[in-house]
């Protein structure tokens, strides 16, 4: 177990962009591979070139570091979140580099995971701990910080979605106080892509005084 003093959690800074993206792709590559049919390097490149994640300023990303290395990343959304303008290659350059069909598939994947946040909500788009840092309590520390942010902003609930096949994550979320709201059935093709039958929408109500 990593000592708590060795885990430093902070809001993302631009200097951490590439390392943050590598850790993030440990989660997102599982979702993107069926759409791109390419390696993690290509997927990371697509995210960078399309400006999918604002690079200069992004209050919606939390970084957990252990000994100056990024051990975990959380992607959050809430009203009033400060971000810089996305930086993207031109459409012509993107099509030339990746092909129109592949770009449309990635765009389709992105829309599938879109979530419109309410005024009183903090939504967790994704949370991942780098493989070599797992089972060290880092995920729980990230959740503690996320809850603190939500309460400081006066938000009343935290929401997230999880694949029904991700038993370990689901067990952690239940332990942290999240409850099931609904489960959405995947289509036959989606079941093949995600190796899951459903994705479960979960919520944690916060005690705001």
Image: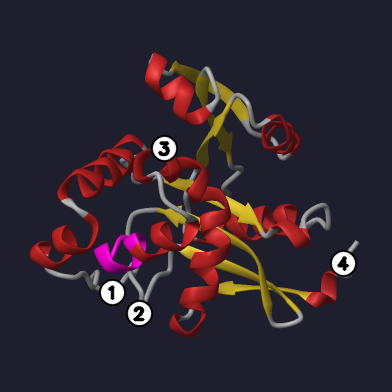
Rendered residue at 59%/36% (across/down):
204
Q: CA gap, disc 4 to disc 1?
A: 33 Å
Of callouts 4 and 1, the N-terminal one: 4
Identify the residue under disc 1.
84
Mark seen at residue 2 = 4
Task: Report the magenta residues as a range.
Answer: 46-53
- Residue 96: in magenta span: no
Closer to the eye: label 3 or 4: 3
Label 1: element kind? loop
Mark seen at residue 99 = none
41 to the left or right of 97: right
- Residue 47: in magenta span: yes
Residue 6: name its quadrant.
bottom right
Mark seen at residue 34 = 3
Of callouts 3 and 1, the N-terminal one: 3
Q: Position of residue 81 (x, y in %)?
A: 36, 63
Of callouts 2 and 1, the N-terminal one: 2
157 or 24, which is in the foreground?
Answer: 24
Of callouts 3 and 2, the N-terminal one: 3
Rendered residue at 23%/49% (across/down):
103
144 or 58, which is in the foreground?
Answer: 58
């Amino acid at each position: 177990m990593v000592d708590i003093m060795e885990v430093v959690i902070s809001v993302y800074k631009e200097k951490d962009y590439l390392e943050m993206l590598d850790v993030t792709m440990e989660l997102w590559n599982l979702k993107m591979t069926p759409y791109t049919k390419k390696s993690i390097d290509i997927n990371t490149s697509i995210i960078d070139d399309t400006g999918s994640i604002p690079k200069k300023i992004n209050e919606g990303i939390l970084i957990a570091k252990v000994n100056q290395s990024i051990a975990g990343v959380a992607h959050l959304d809430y009203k009033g979140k400060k971000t810089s303008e996305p930086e993207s290659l031109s459409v012509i350059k993107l099509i030339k580099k990746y092909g129109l069909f592949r770009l449309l598939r990635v765009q389709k994947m992105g829309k599938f995971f879109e979530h419109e946040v309410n005024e009183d909500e903090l939504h967790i788009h994704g949370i991942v701990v780098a493989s070599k840092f797992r089972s060290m309590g880092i995920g729980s520390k990230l959740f503690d910080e996320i809850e603190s942010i939500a309460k400081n902003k006066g938000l009343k609930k935290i929401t997230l979605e999880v694949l029904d096949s991700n038993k370990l994550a689901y067990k952690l979320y239940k332990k942290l106080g999240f409850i099931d709201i609904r489960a959405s059935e995947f289509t036959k093709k989606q079941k093949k892509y995600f190796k899951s039958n459903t994705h479960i929408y979960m919520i944690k109500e916060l005690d705001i005084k």
